[in-house]
Amino acid sequence: MDDFAGTATSLPAGKEHSVDQDPTLRTLLGRRDLHLRLVGDESALPAGSLDHPLRWVHNSDLTDPTPFLTDDLALLTTGTQFADDDAAGVRAYVHRLVDRGVVALGFGTEVHRSGIPADLAHACAQASLPLFEVPYGTPFLAVARAHAEAIAAQAYARRTWALETQRALSVAALRPHGLESTLTELSRRLGCWVGMYDAAGQLVHEHPEGGSSPVVDEAAADLLARGGSANRVVDAGEAAHTLLTVGRAGHLRGIVAIASGTLDPETRAVVTSVIAMAGLSLEQSEQLARSRRRLHRQLLASLLTDDPTLARRVLGALPPAPVVVAVAAGQRQGAVVEWWERQPADAPAAFLAESEDGLVMCLAVGDAGVLDELAARTDVRIGVSAPEEYSAFSRAHAQALTALRRSGDGVARYADSAESSVLAAFATDEARLIAESRLAPLRQHDAHEGSELERSLRVWLEHDTRLEPAAAALGVHRHTLRTRIAQAAMILDADLTSFPARAELWATLRTAGD
Protein backbone atom coordinates (compact mmCIF):
# COMPACT_ATOMS: atom_id res chain seq x y z
CA MET A 1 0.00 0.00 0.00
CA ASP A 2 1.00 3.63 -0.49
CA ASP A 3 2.91 5.30 2.33
CA PHE A 4 0.83 8.17 3.72
CA ALA A 5 3.39 9.15 6.35
CA GLY A 6 4.44 12.10 4.24
CA THR A 7 1.02 13.73 4.65
CA ALA A 8 1.14 13.59 8.45
CA THR A 9 1.41 16.95 10.25
CA SER A 10 2.84 17.81 13.65
CA LEU A 11 0.60 19.56 16.15
CA PRO A 12 1.30 23.31 16.59
CA ALA A 13 3.36 23.88 19.72
CA GLY A 14 1.03 26.65 20.88
CA LYS A 15 -1.84 24.22 21.35
CA GLU A 16 -0.30 22.06 24.04
CA HIS A 17 -2.72 21.39 26.87
CA SER A 18 -1.93 22.50 30.42
CA VAL A 19 -1.84 19.95 33.22
CA ASP A 20 -4.77 21.45 35.10
CA GLN A 21 -7.17 20.57 32.28
CA ASP A 22 -8.63 17.20 31.37
CA PRO A 23 -6.12 15.22 29.24
CA THR A 24 -7.19 15.14 25.60
CA LEU A 25 -5.88 13.84 22.29
CA ARG A 26 -4.21 17.21 21.85
CA THR A 27 -2.40 16.62 25.15
CA LEU A 28 -1.15 13.27 23.90
CA LEU A 29 -0.09 14.53 20.48
CA GLY A 30 1.71 17.41 22.14
CA ARG A 31 4.18 15.08 23.89
CA ARG A 32 7.27 15.69 21.72
CA ASP A 33 9.11 12.71 23.20
CA LEU A 34 6.54 10.36 21.64
CA HIS A 35 6.94 11.76 18.09
CA LEU A 36 3.24 11.19 17.33
CA ARG A 37 1.90 12.78 14.16
CA LEU A 38 -1.66 13.61 13.19
CA VAL A 39 -2.56 12.26 9.76
CA GLY A 40 -4.04 14.97 7.59
CA ASP A 41 -4.97 18.51 8.55
CA GLU A 42 -6.78 19.33 11.79
CA SER A 43 -9.03 21.75 9.90
CA ALA A 44 -10.53 18.77 8.03
CA LEU A 45 -11.82 17.34 11.31
CA PRO A 46 -14.97 18.53 13.16
CA ALA A 47 -14.31 21.39 15.56
CA GLY A 48 -13.11 20.19 18.95
CA SER A 49 -12.13 16.71 17.78
CA LEU A 50 -8.69 16.97 19.38
CA ASP A 51 -10.01 18.60 22.58
CA HIS A 52 -12.46 15.93 23.63
CA PRO A 53 -11.50 14.46 27.05
CA LEU A 54 -9.53 11.23 26.55
CA ARG A 55 -10.39 8.64 29.16
CA TRP A 56 -7.74 6.01 28.34
CA VAL A 57 -5.38 4.57 25.69
CA HIS A 58 -5.69 0.90 24.72
CA ASN A 59 -4.13 -1.27 22.04
CA SER A 60 -5.61 -4.18 20.11
CA ASP A 61 -5.22 -5.87 16.73
CA LEU A 62 -8.56 -7.66 16.92
CA THR A 63 -10.84 -7.37 13.92
CA ASP A 64 -13.61 -6.28 16.31
CA PRO A 65 -12.23 -5.03 19.61
CA THR A 66 -15.35 -3.01 20.48
CA PRO A 67 -16.72 -5.47 23.11
CA PHE A 68 -13.60 -4.73 25.18
CA LEU A 69 -13.51 -0.93 24.77
CA THR A 70 -15.04 2.00 26.62
CA ASP A 71 -16.22 5.40 25.42
CA ASP A 72 -13.78 8.29 24.96
CA LEU A 73 -10.83 6.00 24.33
CA ALA A 74 -7.91 6.16 21.88
CA LEU A 75 -7.16 2.80 20.26
CA LEU A 76 -3.70 1.77 19.06
CA THR A 77 -3.17 -0.93 16.41
CA THR A 78 -0.47 -2.29 14.12
CA GLY A 79 -2.98 -3.36 11.43
CA THR A 80 -2.40 -7.10 11.43
CA GLN A 81 -6.19 -7.57 11.32
CA PHE A 82 -6.52 -5.87 7.92
CA ALA A 83 -6.52 -8.03 4.80
CA ASP A 84 -4.86 -6.68 1.67
CA ASP A 85 -7.16 -4.85 -0.74
CA ASP A 86 -10.13 -5.08 1.68
CA ALA A 87 -11.34 -1.45 1.68
CA ALA A 88 -14.86 -2.50 2.72
CA GLY A 89 -13.53 -4.39 5.74
CA VAL A 90 -11.44 -1.39 6.79
CA ARG A 91 -14.45 0.93 6.49
CA ALA A 92 -16.55 -1.45 8.58
CA TYR A 93 -13.78 -1.60 11.19
CA VAL A 94 -13.60 2.21 11.46
CA HIS A 95 -17.39 2.54 11.68
CA ARG A 96 -17.48 0.00 14.52
CA LEU A 97 -14.94 2.09 16.43
CA VAL A 98 -16.88 5.33 15.88
CA ASP A 99 -20.15 3.71 16.93
CA ARG A 100 -18.50 2.45 20.12
CA GLY A 101 -17.33 5.94 21.05
CA VAL A 102 -13.63 5.66 20.22
CA VAL A 103 -12.30 9.22 19.78
CA ALA A 104 -9.03 8.50 17.93
CA LEU A 105 -7.07 5.72 16.24
CA GLY A 106 -3.29 5.41 16.46
CA PHE A 107 -1.48 3.31 13.86
CA GLY A 108 1.92 1.79 14.62
CA THR A 109 3.95 1.96 11.41
CA GLU A 110 6.82 -0.23 10.27
CA VAL A 111 5.73 -3.15 12.47
CA HIS A 112 3.57 -5.17 10.09
CA ARG A 113 2.93 -2.50 7.47
CA SER A 114 5.01 0.26 5.98
CA GLY A 115 3.39 3.64 6.55
CA ILE A 116 -0.34 4.33 6.93
CA PRO A 117 -2.61 2.15 4.76
CA ALA A 118 -4.44 4.35 2.26
CA ASP A 119 -7.76 2.55 2.84
CA LEU A 120 -7.50 3.23 6.58
CA ALA A 121 -6.65 6.91 6.07
CA HIS A 122 -9.58 7.36 3.70
CA ALA A 123 -12.00 5.50 6.00
CA CYS A 124 -10.98 7.60 9.01
CA ALA A 125 -11.29 10.82 7.01
CA GLN A 126 -14.78 9.87 5.83
CA ALA A 127 -15.84 8.96 9.40
CA SER A 128 -14.20 12.13 10.86
CA LEU A 129 -12.14 9.91 13.19
CA PRO A 130 -8.75 11.45 14.08
CA LEU A 131 -5.92 9.19 12.90
CA PHE A 132 -2.35 9.56 14.13
CA GLU A 133 0.89 7.74 13.41
CA VAL A 134 2.87 6.00 16.14
CA PRO A 135 6.40 5.62 14.74
CA TYR A 136 8.32 2.38 15.09
CA GLY A 137 10.58 3.78 17.79
CA THR A 138 7.63 4.62 20.10
CA PRO A 139 6.23 1.60 21.98
CA PHE A 140 2.48 1.49 22.52
CA LEU A 141 3.21 1.10 26.23
CA ALA A 142 5.00 4.47 26.20
CA VAL A 143 1.93 6.11 24.68
CA ALA A 144 -0.39 4.57 27.29
CA ARG A 145 2.02 5.49 30.09
CA ALA A 146 2.27 9.08 28.85
CA HIS A 147 -1.49 9.43 28.95
CA ALA A 148 -1.65 7.86 32.42
CA GLU A 149 0.95 10.38 33.58
CA ALA A 150 -1.17 13.20 32.14
CA ILE A 151 -4.20 11.93 34.06
CA ALA A 152 -2.17 11.72 37.26
CA ALA A 153 -0.71 15.19 36.70
CA GLN A 154 -4.15 16.59 36.07
CA ALA A 155 -5.53 14.98 39.23
CA TYR A 156 -2.60 16.29 41.25
CA ALA A 157 -3.04 19.77 39.79
CA ARG A 158 -6.73 19.77 40.66
CA ARG A 159 -6.03 18.64 44.23
CA THR A 160 -3.34 21.29 44.57
CA TRP A 161 -5.73 23.91 43.20
CA ALA A 162 -8.40 22.81 45.66
CA LEU A 163 -6.01 23.09 48.63
CA GLU A 164 -4.75 26.51 47.57
CA THR A 165 -8.28 27.69 46.97
CA GLN A 166 -9.40 26.47 50.39
CA ARG A 167 -6.55 28.43 52.00
CA ALA A 168 -7.42 31.56 50.05
CA LEU A 169 -11.09 31.26 51.00
CA SER A 170 -10.18 30.81 54.67
CA VAL A 171 -8.10 34.00 54.57
CA ALA A 172 -10.93 35.86 52.81
CA ALA A 173 -13.39 34.77 55.49
CA LEU A 174 -11.30 36.59 58.11
CA ARG A 175 -11.56 39.93 56.30
CA PRO A 176 -14.24 42.54 57.03
CA HIS A 177 -17.50 41.46 55.40
CA GLY A 178 -16.11 37.93 55.41
CA LEU A 179 -18.98 36.28 53.51
CA GLU A 180 -18.82 38.79 50.66
CA SER A 181 -15.02 38.53 50.53
CA THR A 182 -15.23 34.73 50.41
CA LEU A 183 -17.69 34.78 47.52
CA THR A 184 -15.52 37.25 45.62
CA GLU A 185 -12.46 35.04 46.12
CA LEU A 186 -14.45 32.01 44.97
CA SER A 187 -15.38 33.88 41.78
CA ARG A 188 -11.73 34.70 41.09
CA ARG A 189 -10.60 31.13 41.71
CA LEU A 190 -13.31 29.63 39.53
CA GLY A 191 -12.89 32.25 36.84
CA CYS A 192 -16.64 32.81 36.57
CA TRP A 193 -19.47 34.91 37.98
CA VAL A 194 -20.67 34.12 41.52
CA GLY A 195 -23.75 35.70 43.10
CA MET A 196 -25.51 35.53 46.48
CA TYR A 197 -29.27 35.89 46.92
CA ASP A 198 -30.76 36.52 50.35
CA ALA A 199 -33.83 34.77 51.77
CA ALA A 200 -36.07 37.34 50.06
CA GLY A 201 -34.62 36.45 46.64
CA GLN A 202 -32.71 39.73 46.31
CA LEU A 203 -29.24 39.68 44.75
CA VAL A 204 -27.10 41.06 47.58
CA HIS A 205 -23.60 40.33 46.28
CA GLU A 206 -22.01 39.43 42.95
CA HIS A 207 -18.58 39.28 41.37
CA PRO A 208 -18.01 40.46 38.76
CA GLU A 209 -20.95 42.85 38.56
CA GLY A 210 -23.65 42.40 35.95
CA GLY A 211 -23.39 38.63 35.64
CA SER A 212 -26.94 37.78 36.69
CA SER A 213 -30.01 37.50 34.47
CA PRO A 214 -33.80 37.46 34.90
CA VAL A 215 -33.76 33.69 34.35
CA VAL A 216 -31.32 33.14 37.23
CA ASP A 217 -33.20 35.62 39.44
CA GLU A 218 -36.48 33.81 38.82
CA ALA A 219 -34.96 30.39 39.44
CA ALA A 220 -33.45 31.57 42.74
CA ALA A 221 -36.80 32.98 43.87
CA ASP A 222 -38.51 29.70 42.94
CA LEU A 223 -36.02 27.62 44.94
CA LEU A 224 -36.50 29.85 47.97
CA ALA A 225 -40.28 29.67 47.66
CA ARG A 226 -40.14 25.86 47.65
CA GLY A 227 -38.19 25.99 50.90
CA GLY A 228 -36.30 22.73 50.43
CA SER A 229 -32.56 22.21 50.40
CA ALA A 230 -31.64 21.59 46.77
CA ASN A 231 -29.28 22.28 43.87
CA ARG A 232 -30.42 23.24 40.40
CA VAL A 233 -28.76 23.83 37.03
CA VAL A 234 -30.42 26.62 35.06
CA ASP A 235 -29.91 27.29 31.36
CA ALA A 236 -29.47 31.07 31.23
CA GLY A 237 -28.84 31.61 27.53
CA GLU A 238 -25.15 31.39 26.64
CA ALA A 239 -24.09 29.72 29.90
CA ALA A 240 -25.66 27.37 32.41
CA HIS A 241 -25.74 28.38 36.08
CA THR A 242 -25.61 26.14 39.15
CA LEU A 243 -27.79 27.27 42.06
CA LEU A 244 -27.15 25.93 45.57
CA THR A 245 -29.32 26.64 48.61
CA VAL A 246 -27.83 27.92 51.88
CA GLY A 247 -29.42 26.79 55.13
CA ARG A 248 -31.55 23.86 56.16
CA ALA A 249 -34.82 22.80 54.55
CA GLY A 250 -37.70 24.95 55.67
CA HIS A 251 -35.34 27.65 56.90
CA LEU A 252 -33.29 28.70 53.86
CA ARG A 253 -30.90 31.61 54.27
CA GLY A 254 -30.27 32.26 50.61
CA ILE A 255 -28.92 30.99 47.30
CA VAL A 256 -25.37 30.89 45.92
CA ALA A 257 -25.35 30.99 42.11
CA ILE A 258 -22.32 30.04 39.98
CA ALA A 259 -22.05 30.67 36.25
CA SER A 260 -21.07 27.07 35.50
CA GLY A 261 -23.28 24.15 34.66
CA THR A 262 -20.79 21.42 35.56
CA LEU A 263 -18.66 21.17 38.70
CA ASP A 264 -15.92 18.55 38.90
CA PRO A 265 -15.36 16.79 42.27
CA GLU A 266 -12.64 19.21 43.40
CA THR A 267 -14.69 22.27 42.48
CA ARG A 268 -17.78 20.83 44.11
CA ALA A 269 -15.81 20.18 47.31
CA VAL A 270 -14.62 23.81 47.34
CA VAL A 271 -18.11 25.14 46.66
CA THR A 272 -19.56 22.89 49.36
CA SER A 273 -17.14 24.37 51.89
CA VAL A 274 -18.19 27.87 50.84
CA ILE A 275 -21.85 26.93 51.27
CA ALA A 276 -21.04 25.62 54.76
CA MET A 277 -19.16 28.83 55.62
CA ALA A 278 -22.02 30.92 54.28
CA GLY A 279 -24.51 28.96 56.36
CA LEU A 280 -22.36 29.37 59.48
CA SER A 281 -21.89 33.09 58.88
CA LEU A 282 -25.59 33.64 58.32
CA GLU A 283 -26.44 31.51 61.36
CA GLN A 284 -24.18 33.65 63.53
CA SER A 285 -25.84 36.73 62.12
CA GLU A 286 -29.17 35.14 62.91
CA GLN A 287 -28.20 34.68 66.56
CA LEU A 288 -27.45 38.38 66.81
CA ALA A 289 -30.68 39.11 64.96
CA ARG A 290 -32.64 37.00 67.46
CA SER A 291 -31.29 39.09 70.33
CA ARG A 292 -32.19 42.25 68.45
CA ARG A 293 -35.69 40.93 67.74
CA ARG A 294 -36.26 40.20 71.45
CA LEU A 295 -35.24 43.77 72.26
CA HIS A 296 -37.54 45.17 69.59
CA ARG A 297 -40.48 43.14 70.90
CA GLN A 298 -39.98 44.79 74.27
CA LEU A 299 -39.74 48.22 72.66
CA LEU A 300 -42.95 47.53 70.72
CA ALA A 301 -44.74 46.89 74.01
CA SER A 302 -43.52 50.29 75.18
CA LEU A 303 -44.65 52.02 71.99
CA LEU A 304 -48.12 50.48 72.34
CA THR A 305 -48.48 52.53 75.54
CA ASP A 306 -48.23 55.60 73.23
CA ASP A 307 -44.93 56.61 74.83
CA PRO A 308 -41.86 56.55 72.51
CA THR A 309 -39.41 57.71 75.20
CA LEU A 310 -37.86 54.29 75.92
CA ALA A 311 -37.60 53.36 72.23
CA ARG A 312 -35.83 56.63 71.41
CA ARG A 313 -33.47 56.17 74.35
CA VAL A 314 -32.50 52.64 73.29
CA LEU A 315 -32.44 53.08 69.51
CA GLY A 316 -31.23 56.65 69.42
CA ALA A 317 -33.88 57.64 66.87
CA LEU A 318 -37.19 56.53 65.41
CA PRO A 319 -38.71 57.27 61.99
CA PRO A 320 -39.87 60.91 62.02
CA ALA A 321 -43.55 61.51 62.78
CA PRO A 322 -46.16 61.39 61.43
CA VAL A 323 -45.74 57.68 60.85
CA VAL A 324 -47.72 54.75 59.56
CA VAL A 325 -47.79 51.41 61.33
CA ALA A 326 -47.92 48.30 59.17
CA VAL A 327 -48.47 44.66 60.14
CA ALA A 328 -47.28 41.91 57.79
CA ALA A 329 -48.62 38.35 57.81
CA GLY A 330 -47.49 35.34 55.82
CA GLN A 331 -45.00 32.49 55.84
CA ARG A 332 -42.09 34.65 54.70
CA GLN A 333 -42.00 37.29 57.42
CA GLY A 334 -38.31 36.43 57.94
CA ALA A 335 -37.65 37.46 54.35
CA VAL A 336 -39.19 40.85 55.11
CA VAL A 337 -36.76 41.37 57.99
CA GLU A 338 -33.78 40.32 55.86
CA TRP A 339 -34.92 42.61 53.06
CA TRP A 340 -34.89 45.59 55.43
CA GLU A 341 -31.52 44.60 56.87
CA ARG A 342 -29.99 44.44 53.39
CA GLN A 343 -31.03 47.98 52.50
CA PRO A 344 -28.25 50.59 52.11
CA ALA A 345 -27.57 53.16 54.79
CA ASP A 346 -29.53 55.85 52.95
CA ALA A 347 -32.67 53.66 52.66
CA PRO A 348 -35.89 54.68 54.48
CA ALA A 349 -35.59 54.29 58.26
CA ALA A 350 -37.97 51.79 59.84
CA PHE A 351 -38.65 50.16 63.18
CA LEU A 352 -39.45 46.43 62.97
CA ALA A 353 -40.69 44.14 65.70
CA GLU A 354 -42.23 40.68 65.72
CA SER A 355 -45.48 40.13 67.59
CA GLU A 356 -48.23 37.54 67.90
CA ASP A 357 -50.24 39.47 65.32
CA GLY A 358 -47.44 39.50 62.73
CA LEU A 359 -44.40 41.60 61.87
CA VAL A 360 -44.98 45.20 62.95
CA MET A 361 -43.29 47.94 60.92
CA CYS A 362 -43.21 51.65 61.68
CA LEU A 363 -41.96 54.14 59.10
CA ALA A 364 -42.42 57.75 58.08
CA VAL A 365 -45.46 58.60 55.98
CA GLY A 366 -43.28 59.67 53.07
CA ASP A 367 -41.61 56.26 52.94
CA ALA A 368 -44.80 54.18 53.06
CA GLY A 369 -44.68 53.52 49.32
CA VAL A 370 -41.86 51.03 49.85
CA LEU A 371 -44.37 48.64 51.44
CA ASP A 372 -45.89 47.86 48.01
CA GLU A 373 -42.48 46.78 46.69
CA LEU A 374 -41.87 44.77 49.83
CA ALA A 375 -45.20 42.91 49.56
CA ALA A 376 -44.58 42.08 45.89
CA ARG A 377 -41.04 40.86 46.55
CA THR A 378 -41.76 38.71 49.62
CA ASP A 379 -45.34 37.59 48.90
CA VAL A 380 -46.75 38.69 52.27
CA ARG A 381 -49.99 40.50 53.15
CA ILE A 382 -49.60 43.91 54.78
CA GLY A 383 -52.14 46.07 56.60
CA VAL A 384 -51.25 49.76 56.87
CA SER A 385 -52.63 52.37 59.26
CA ALA A 386 -53.55 55.98 58.61
CA PRO A 387 -50.85 58.59 59.47
CA GLU A 388 -50.56 59.11 63.22
CA GLU A 389 -48.25 60.64 65.84
CA TYR A 390 -46.38 58.41 68.29
CA SER A 391 -48.86 59.49 70.96
CA ALA A 392 -51.49 57.51 69.01
CA PHE A 393 -49.27 54.51 68.15
CA SER A 394 -51.71 52.00 69.69
CA ARG A 395 -54.55 53.36 67.55
CA ALA A 396 -52.41 53.13 64.42
CA HIS A 397 -51.51 49.54 65.34
CA ALA A 398 -55.19 48.66 65.72
CA GLN A 399 -55.94 50.26 62.34
CA ALA A 400 -53.19 48.22 60.68
CA LEU A 401 -54.62 45.00 62.15
CA THR A 402 -58.10 45.94 60.91
CA ALA A 403 -56.77 46.60 57.40
CA LEU A 404 -54.85 43.30 57.50
CA ARG A 405 -57.97 41.32 58.41
CA ARG A 406 -59.83 42.83 55.47
CA SER A 407 -56.96 42.48 53.00
CA GLY A 408 -56.62 39.95 50.22
CA ASP A 409 -53.16 39.97 48.68
CA GLY A 410 -50.55 42.69 48.83
CA VAL A 411 -51.05 45.92 50.77
CA ALA A 412 -54.36 47.01 52.33
CA ARG A 413 -54.60 50.52 53.77
CA TYR A 414 -56.94 51.36 56.61
CA ALA A 415 -57.83 54.69 55.02
CA ASP A 416 -59.20 52.85 51.98
CA SER A 417 -61.19 50.28 53.94
CA ALA A 418 -62.53 52.87 56.40
CA GLU A 419 -64.12 54.78 53.56
CA SER A 420 -66.49 51.89 52.78
CA SER A 421 -68.68 52.47 55.88
CA VAL A 422 -68.89 51.81 59.57
CA LEU A 423 -71.41 49.07 58.82
CA ALA A 424 -68.66 46.92 57.32
CA ALA A 425 -67.11 46.64 60.76
CA PHE A 426 -70.29 44.96 62.04
CA ALA A 427 -70.61 42.51 59.15
CA THR A 428 -69.89 39.44 61.27
CA ASP A 429 -71.28 35.97 60.62
CA GLU A 430 -73.70 36.40 63.51
CA ALA A 431 -74.92 39.76 62.18
CA ARG A 432 -75.44 38.32 58.69
CA LEU A 433 -77.43 35.40 60.15
CA ILE A 434 -79.71 37.80 62.06
CA ALA A 435 -80.18 40.03 58.99
CA GLU A 436 -81.05 37.09 56.73
CA SER A 437 -83.57 35.80 59.29
CA ARG A 438 -85.12 39.27 59.56
CA LEU A 439 -85.57 39.52 55.80
CA ALA A 440 -86.66 35.92 55.27
CA PRO A 441 -90.49 36.67 55.22
CA LEU A 442 -89.95 39.44 52.67
CA ARG A 443 -87.78 37.29 50.43
CA GLN A 444 -90.22 34.38 50.62
CA HIS A 445 -93.03 36.74 49.54
CA ASP A 446 -90.96 38.03 46.60
CA ALA A 447 -90.09 34.50 45.54
CA HIS A 448 -93.71 33.29 45.77
CA GLU A 449 -95.42 36.33 44.23
CA GLY A 450 -92.68 37.38 41.83
CA SER A 451 -92.68 40.84 43.41
CA GLU A 452 -89.76 43.19 44.06
CA LEU A 453 -90.46 44.43 47.56
CA GLU A 454 -86.87 44.01 48.81
CA ARG A 455 -85.41 45.79 45.78
CA SER A 456 -87.98 48.57 46.12
CA LEU A 457 -86.99 49.09 49.76
CA ARG A 458 -83.29 49.26 48.82
CA VAL A 459 -83.84 51.82 46.08
CA TRP A 460 -86.17 53.87 48.28
CA LEU A 461 -83.64 54.03 51.12
CA GLU A 462 -80.79 54.75 48.68
CA HIS A 463 -82.77 57.80 47.50
CA ASP A 464 -83.18 59.11 51.07
CA THR A 465 -86.79 57.75 51.24
CA ARG A 466 -87.92 60.21 48.55
CA LEU A 467 -90.71 58.69 46.46
CA GLU A 468 -90.31 60.59 43.18
CA PRO A 469 -86.64 59.82 42.40
CA ALA A 470 -86.89 56.28 43.80
CA ALA A 471 -89.97 55.51 41.66
CA ALA A 472 -88.19 56.91 38.62
CA ALA A 473 -85.18 54.68 39.29
CA LEU A 474 -87.48 51.66 39.58
CA GLY A 475 -89.54 52.66 36.53
CA VAL A 476 -92.87 52.65 38.43
CA HIS A 477 -95.36 55.25 39.57
CA ARG A 478 -94.80 56.85 42.99
CA HIS A 479 -98.14 55.46 44.19
CA THR A 480 -97.04 51.96 43.22
CA LEU A 481 -93.86 52.44 45.19
CA ARG A 482 -95.80 53.78 48.19
CA THR A 483 -98.00 50.66 48.10
CA ARG A 484 -94.94 48.39 47.95
CA ILE A 485 -93.33 50.09 50.94
CA ALA A 486 -96.48 49.75 52.99
CA GLN A 487 -96.79 46.08 52.04
CA ALA A 488 -93.14 45.42 52.94
CA ALA A 489 -93.58 47.21 56.28
CA MET A 490 -96.56 45.00 57.07
CA ILE A 491 -94.67 41.80 56.17
CA LEU A 492 -91.66 42.87 58.26
CA ASP A 493 -93.87 44.21 61.05
CA ALA A 494 -91.90 47.48 61.03
CA ASP A 495 -92.97 51.11 61.32
CA LEU A 496 -91.00 52.69 58.49
CA THR A 497 -92.20 56.18 59.28
CA SER A 498 -89.50 56.57 61.98
CA PHE A 499 -85.78 57.15 61.37
CA PRO A 500 -84.58 54.40 63.75
CA ALA A 501 -86.69 51.81 61.92
CA ARG A 502 -85.39 52.99 58.56
CA ALA A 503 -81.80 52.97 59.81
CA GLU A 504 -82.17 49.45 61.17
CA LEU A 505 -83.72 48.29 57.89
CA TRP A 506 -80.86 49.85 55.91
CA ALA A 507 -78.28 48.13 58.14
CA THR A 508 -80.17 44.83 57.76
CA LEU A 509 -80.24 45.09 53.97
CA ARG A 510 -76.52 45.97 53.79
CA THR A 511 -75.49 43.20 56.17
CA ALA A 512 -77.58 40.49 54.52
CA GLY A 513 -76.38 41.36 51.03
CA ASP A 514 -78.21 40.54 47.82
Image (tube, grey):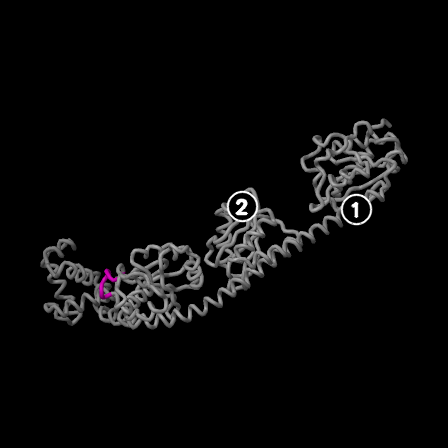
Bounds of the magenta segment: 417-423
Task: Say which element carries label 1.
Answer: loop
Task: Say which element carries label 2.
Answer: strand
Q: Position of residue 354 (x, y in %)?
A: 39, 68
Q: Position of residue 184 (x, y in %)?
A: 55, 52
Q: Position of residue 55 (x, y in %)?
A: 75, 46
Which residue is found at the position 55% from the left and 62% from the top?
279
User: Is the Cβ of the residue at disc 2 closer than 8 Å to that at disc 1?
Assistant: no
Amino acid found under the numbered disc labelled 1: Leu
Q: Is 345 on the left-hand or right-hand side of 177?
A: left
Q: Is 423 on the left-hand or right-hand side of 358?
A: left
- Name the residue nearer the viewer: 162 or 330: 162
The answer, for residue 405, to whether it is visible in the render is yes
Quarter placement of the C terminus: bottom left
Q: Is 442 on the left-hand or right-hand side of 363?
A: left
- Name the residue nearer the viewer: 340 or 399: 340
| Residue 196 circle label | none
From the image, tell me which residue sits under label 1: 69
Q: Position of residue 208 (x, y in %)?
A: 53, 47
From the image, tell me which residue sits under label 2: 236
Count neighbours of disc 1 (C-alpha within 10 A) and say few if under 14, some if 14 to 19, many if 20 or more: some
Figure quadrant of residue 351: bottom left
Q: Is 399 on the left-hand or right-hand side of 333?
A: left
Quarter placement of the N terminus: top right
